[in-house]
Image (tube, rainbow, N blue to C red):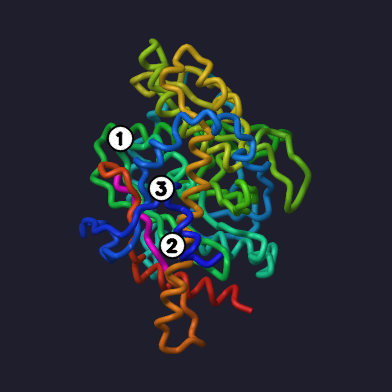
């Protein structure tokens, strides 16, 4: 189906017709003739629908690892390499102080924080790294069986949008042949308050003291061997309805001694690590299940991570206990808990994700048609690129031109996959 016809069929899903929008969008490349996705309308039409509840077609297929990479402390990328994958190792004693090393961390953070590369994309979030790992492991012909390539961060943001009334986001996108490729757009952040930096460090410190490089047959010493900037990224394939998605996700660690097979298609028993303030009353439990549980669930569910270990701390940064949570149970128990009045529905997240990915593809197909009609030299590669921007206070997602930097990145990726 041509893009124009498909977009017409998306009206009931949430698409609006052309409308002007503020030129203050971060992209700076505004096109007032474009459509927007009406999030508010989508919420009215879909949230609370009885026919959406327990729609098994919305559940993703089991993620299957097809590639991976390790990133070193100097931000070198080792394709299909597991050297940065760490093993979970519970702290020897609780409580323990998560503040240890904070001052050194702040100094190191400013020294080693990645800067944008020549394409303007942050070094630690460039989708071309994901494409490179896929091409090395599976070859360029594999793209015929992949509908979407993205980091998990983008799908997290899309899936959480029905429940998001505060946080703006932006995603750059292009089509490589028929594959929809999504790039993370980093928003400028205000200077973090000291308390925010400390909370950030608590999560980092928990990962330091709860993971190790040594195997279960070796004795772990007291020295923390984690280095700032290191990362292991798993790339998994799964289906969401008809869409075949290749998703890249940073993995905190694996469980000791448990591996499901070897090589492509297998996954270690990956584990997500989180920190949270200890819950002492109903209001705090309410906030946990309303705001944190949904984020924990979608992040782990999309990557096929079954176990989440949450380190609960007090206000002074003392780690008091570690609780193991099952990803599937986290989604199903919230509606059945005493706090069901703040429950969220995983099917709402998945339905919105499916609808919006269709909308993105349709908009890009329209852009391809326009580009081909206006091309001066049809033989030259044309890679239309768009930016999708969620504006919370207007409850809609605007479409504009992506930045020239992403256009350059798209051309570079196209050169890697063209026949």
Instruction: Kindly report the distance in space between the C-alpha atoms of the residues bearing marks 1 and 2.
Output: 38 Å
Q: Nearer the viewer, mark 1 or mark 2?
A: 2
User: How many other residues sit within 10 Å of disc 1, few (<14), some (14-19) or many (≥20)?
Assistant: few
Residue 12's x, y, as percent? 44, 47
Q: Quadrant of residue 325?
A: top right
Q: Report whether residue 253 is seen.
A: yes
Q: Nearer the viewer, mark 3 or mark 2?
A: 3
Residue contact at pointers 3 and 2, CB within 8 angstroms: no
Residue 275's x, y, as percent? 45, 28
- Badge 1 is on which residue? 196
User: How many other residues sit within 10 Å of disc 3, few (<14), some (14-19) or many (≥20)?
Assistant: many
Number of numbered discs on residues: 3
Residue 394's x, y, as percent? 27, 44
Taking 347 as reference, is 365 above or below it?
Answer: below
Q: Which secondary structure is most common in the magenta stretch?
A: strand
- Badge 3 is on which residue? 14
Q: Which comes before the other along the chain, label 3 or label 2?
A: 3
Taking 48 as reference, is 176 above or below it?
Answer: below
Q: Residue at x 57, y 74 (%)?
A: 416
Q: Which comes before the other along the chain, label 1 or label 3?
A: 3
Q: Which mark is residue 224?
A: none
User: Which quadrant would the N terminus be assigned to in this image?
Assistant: bottom right
Helix, strand or loop under label 1: helix
Instruction: Kindly report the distance in space between the C-alpha atoms of the residues bearing marks 1 and 3.
Output: 36 Å
Helix, strand or loop under label 2: helix
Q: Report whether residue 186 is seen.
A: no
Residue 75's x, y, as percent? 48, 58
Q: Which comes before the other along the chain, label 1 or label 2?
A: 1
């Amino acid at each position: 189906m041509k893009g124009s016809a498909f977009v017409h069929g998306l009206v009931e899903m949430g698409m609006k017709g052309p409308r002007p929008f503020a030129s203050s969008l971060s992209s700076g490349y505004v096109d007032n003739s474009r459509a927007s996705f009406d999030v508010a309308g989508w919420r009215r039409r879909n949230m609370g629908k009885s026919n959406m509840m327990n729609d098994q077609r919305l559940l993703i297929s089991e993620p299957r690892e097809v590639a991976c990479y390790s990133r070193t402390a100097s931000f070198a990328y080792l394709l299909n390499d597991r050297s940065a994958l760490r093993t979970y190792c519970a702290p020897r004693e609780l409580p323990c102080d998560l503040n240890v090393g904070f001052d050194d961390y702040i100094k190191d953070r400013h020294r080693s924080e990645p800067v944008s590369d020549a394409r303007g994309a942050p070094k630690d979030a460039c989708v071309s790294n994901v494409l490179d790992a896929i091409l090395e492991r599976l070859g360029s012909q594999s793209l015929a069986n992949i509908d979407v390539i993205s980091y998990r961060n983008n799908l997290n943001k899309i899936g959480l949008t029905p429940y998001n009334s505060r946080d703006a986001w932006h995603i750059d996108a292009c089509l490589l042949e028929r594959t929809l490729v999504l790039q993370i757009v980093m928003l400028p952040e205000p200077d973090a308050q000291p308390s925010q930096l400390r909370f950030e460090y608590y999560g980092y410190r928990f990962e330091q003291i709860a993971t190790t490089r040594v195997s279960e047959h070796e004795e772990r010493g007291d020295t923390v061997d984690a280095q700032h900037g290191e990362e292991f990224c798993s790339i998994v394939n799964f289906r969401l309805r008809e869409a075949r998605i290749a998703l890249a996700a940073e993995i905190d660690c694996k469980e000791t001694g448990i591996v499901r097979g070897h090589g492509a298609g297998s996954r270690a028993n990956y584990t997500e690590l989180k920190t949270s303030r200890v819950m002492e009353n109903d209001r705090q439990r309410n906030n946990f299940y309303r705001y944190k549980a949904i984020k924990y669930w979608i992040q782990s569910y999309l990557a096929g991570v079954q176990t989440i270990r949450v380190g609960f701390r007090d206000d002074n940064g003392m780690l008091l206990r570690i609780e193991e949570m099952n990803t599937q149970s986290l989604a199903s128990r919230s509606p059945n808990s005493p706090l069901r009045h703040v429950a969220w529905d995983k099917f709402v997240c998945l339905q919105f994700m499916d609808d919006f990915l269709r909308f993105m593809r349709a908009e890009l197909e329209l852009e391809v048609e326009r580009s081909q009609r206006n091309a001066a030299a049809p033989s030259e590669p044309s890679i239309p690129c768009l930016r999708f921007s969620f504006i919370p206070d207007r409850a809609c997602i605007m479409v504009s031109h992506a930045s020239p930097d992403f256009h350059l990145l798209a051309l570079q990726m196209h050169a890697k996959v063209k026949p």
